[in-house]
Image: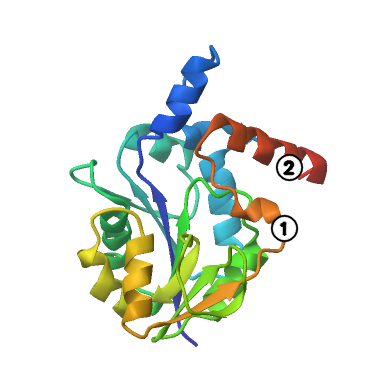
Amino acid sequence: MELISAVVTAAGRGSRMFRDMQELGLEPVHKLLLPIDSVTVIEKTLDSVLRAGVDECIVVTGHHAGEVEEAIAGMDVEIVRNDPPDVPLAASLLNGVLSASGEIILCVAGDQPAVSPGTMGRISEHADPETVSILARGRSGWLDSAEGLGMPLAASSELLRRYLPMGDGNINPLLRLMVDDGIRLYGVEASDPIELVNINHYSDYLRIMEYFGVKGE
């Protein structure tokens, strides 16, 4: 059985959230450290990742590294800190992938606490050396376009090591390049529409809070 490593990115500035909170007259807090259900956003995300059947979990930190690392101290994760911290998402993912031992890598953003362990597990199951498996945003199954897609995704370590060094920003241009090169793309349907929400703005955070309040988790 193939080993599955998770790489969770927790390295960004969270600038949009800071701006939103300032405009609302709230004390700015990094988005990953906002509370959900008596824990932080990053803890909620990591709890789901650790219950998704992965063999190891690597968290990549950068901006606000000390605060993020303190929040997750005691969790069963390995920390990789970007040095320097100001690097694009592709570089953060690569730093995590290079420290991972798994053949398959599940890549998750730290601001995705609503993605369930079951959905993450299904994403991992569909990845293989020539297939990138990804959370579908629209049509699911075999896809011929990467338009609008990002994390969470799963792919082989070899594939990520080959393509991530080509990236200088977010992951979507690399996904489009992979499709152009003949790499297969499989979209896994979300179990709930809320799984498609990344916490970038304060309104996103409120939607996530409402969801977990309704679910009573």
Label 2 CA crowd tier, 10 Å (few <14, some 14–19, many 20+): some
- The residue drawn where x is 39% and y is 86% is 129
Position of 92 with respect to 45 (left or right) is left
| 142 and 100: which is toward the camera | 142
| 16 and 44: which is toward the camera | 16
Q: Position of residue 170 (x, y in %)?
A: 34, 54
Q: What residue sits right under mark 2 in the picture?
A: 212
Q: Nearer the viewer, mark 1 or mark 2?
A: 1
Q: What residue sits right under mark 1 in the picture?
A: 192
Q: Is residue 152 above or below residue 34?
A: below
Q: Is residue 124 above or below residue 111?
A: below
- Dividing the picture into quadrants, the one containing residue 8 is bottom left
Position of 49 with respect to 161 (left or right) is right
Q: Say the numbered circle drawn on residue 206.
A: none
| 16 and 32: which is toward the camera | 16
Image quarter of the C terminus: top right
Residue 200 in view: yes
- The residue drawn where x is 50% and y is 16% is 23
Position of 178 with respect to 215 (left or right) is left
Q: Is residue 55 above or below residue 25?
A: below
Query: Which element is circle 1 on?
Result: loop
Q: Position of residue 36 (x, y in %)?
A: 64, 36
Identified by mark 2, the residue type is Phe
Query: Which element is circle 2 on?
Result: helix
- The residue drawn where x is 74% and y is 37% is 210
Q: Hey, which residue is sitting farthest left in the picture?
A: 84
Q: Hey, which residue is sitting farthest top in the picture?
A: 25
**Distance from Cα at disc 1 to Cα at disc 2:** 12 Å
What coloring was used for the rendering?
rainbow
Identified by mark 1, the residue type is Asp
